[in-house]
Image (cartoon, rainbow, N blue to C red):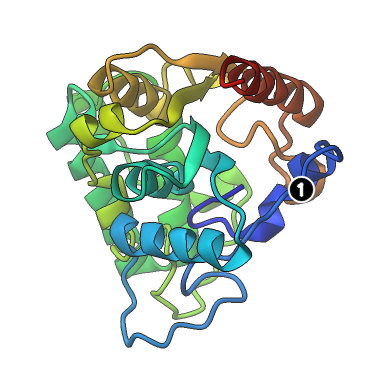
């Protein structure tokens, strides 16, 4: 189970619901407990894919089933393209590949506005802008950009600025993740069964639209899961999904794929 920028701590609820499987989680390079030694601060799907491959190799565990969330789903698609023998079944949940949407340039502009709010006014302003962007329904129109700046207090977000500007979600450090374009030909040639998953509550918002666009790029349709972008979370992070229902749906897909591969 992999995420980005979420680290291993976000998968506790989901992992606990798979006692019959050996579950491995990890902190992506430079996130969570991971300390970088390469002198860089940016996050790229290619580097993270190499890291995931290294983990699988070190464990001697391949090929594996993989559930990947958000930016982790982008990493996982890169793994399939670069290391096709590593994964048997990939469930890629809501990959935020904004440039694949029909309004890609506008989505890129919206992303830049989030980072601008963060750089100018700090984490509270940046997170408020991020929430406004990710909860907007439909394409990013002139009406979206004409809105007043999102107020952190309206979302219950602290307004204090701690002075840091290194947040992997709000800064430009992960732009390579959301700008990534999967290698559709390499993925099609891989033996991996790839399932693009989307939460039923995400249908009209950005990550729902990016999921549909990713599935279309790969010549398939999305698989609908319960809840939202964090549908596998319990209440620990204040963004509770439906972890029981989510795990049931994930198990259905993994078991069906395993049966088909026998």
Above or below, 221 against 52 in this view is: above
Residue drawn at x 46%, y 32% as measured from the top left: 94
Give the crowd class for mark 1: few <14, some 14-19, many >=20 residues within 10 Å: few
Instruction: Say left or right for 99 vs 67.
Output: left
Instruction: Say left or right for 176 vs 155.
Output: left
* Residue 247 found in image quarter: top right
Above or below, 40 against 203 in this view is: below
Q: Closest to the observer: 220 or 193? A: 193
The mark tally for this picture is 1
Residue 146 visible in the shown view: no
Q: Quadrant of the C terminus?
A: top right
Across and down, in percent, residue 71 comes to 43, 48
| Mark 1 element type | loop
Q: Which residue is mark 1?
A: 22
Across and down, in percent, residue 260 comes to 58, 15
Residue 93 visible in the shown view: yes
* Residue 36 found in image quarter: bottom left
Residue drawn at x 38%, y 57% as measured from the top left: 49
Residue drawn at x 47%, y 59% as measured from the top left: 52
Across and down, in percent, residue 128 comes to 47, 49
Above or below, 146 against 237 in this view is: above
Q: Closest to the observer: 49 or 30? A: 49
Across and down, in percent, residue 250 comes to 66, 25
- Return the residue found at the far left: 105
Residue drawn at x 56%, y 56% as measured from the top left: 6
């Amino acid at each position: 189970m992999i995420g980005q920028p979420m680290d291993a701590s976000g998968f506790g609820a989901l992992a606990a619901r798979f006692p019959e499987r050996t579950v491995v989680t990890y902190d992506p390079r430079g996130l969570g407990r991971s300390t970088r030694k390469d002198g860089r601060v940016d996050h790229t799907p290619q580097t993270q894919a190499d890291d995931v491959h290294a983990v699988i190799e070190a464990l001697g565990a391949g090929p594996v089933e993989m559930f990947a969330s958000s930016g982790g789903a982008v990493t996982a698609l890169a793994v399939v393209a670069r290391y096709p023998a590593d994964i048997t079944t990939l469930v890629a949940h809501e990959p935020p590949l904004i440039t694949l949407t029909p309004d890609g340039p506008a989505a890129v502009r919206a992303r830049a506005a989030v980072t601008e709010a963060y750089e100018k006014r700090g984490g509270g302003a940046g997170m408020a802008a991020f929430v406004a962007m990710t909860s907007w329904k439909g394409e990013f129109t002139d009406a979206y950009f004409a809105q007043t700046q999102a107020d952190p207090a309206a979302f219950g977000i602290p307004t204090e600025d701690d002075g840091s500007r290194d947040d992997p979600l709000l800064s430009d450090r992960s732009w390579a993740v959301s700008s990534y374009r999967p290698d559709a030909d390499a993925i099609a040639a891989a033996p991996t069964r790839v399932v693009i998953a989307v939460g039923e509550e995400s249908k009209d918002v950005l990550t729902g639209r990016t999921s549909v666009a990713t599935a279309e790029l790969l010549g398939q349709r999305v698989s609908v899961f319960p809840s939202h972008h964090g549908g596998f979370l319990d209440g620990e992070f204040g963004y509770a999904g439906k972890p029981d229902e989510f795990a049931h749906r994930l198990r259905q897909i993994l078991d069906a794929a395993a049966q088909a591969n026998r």
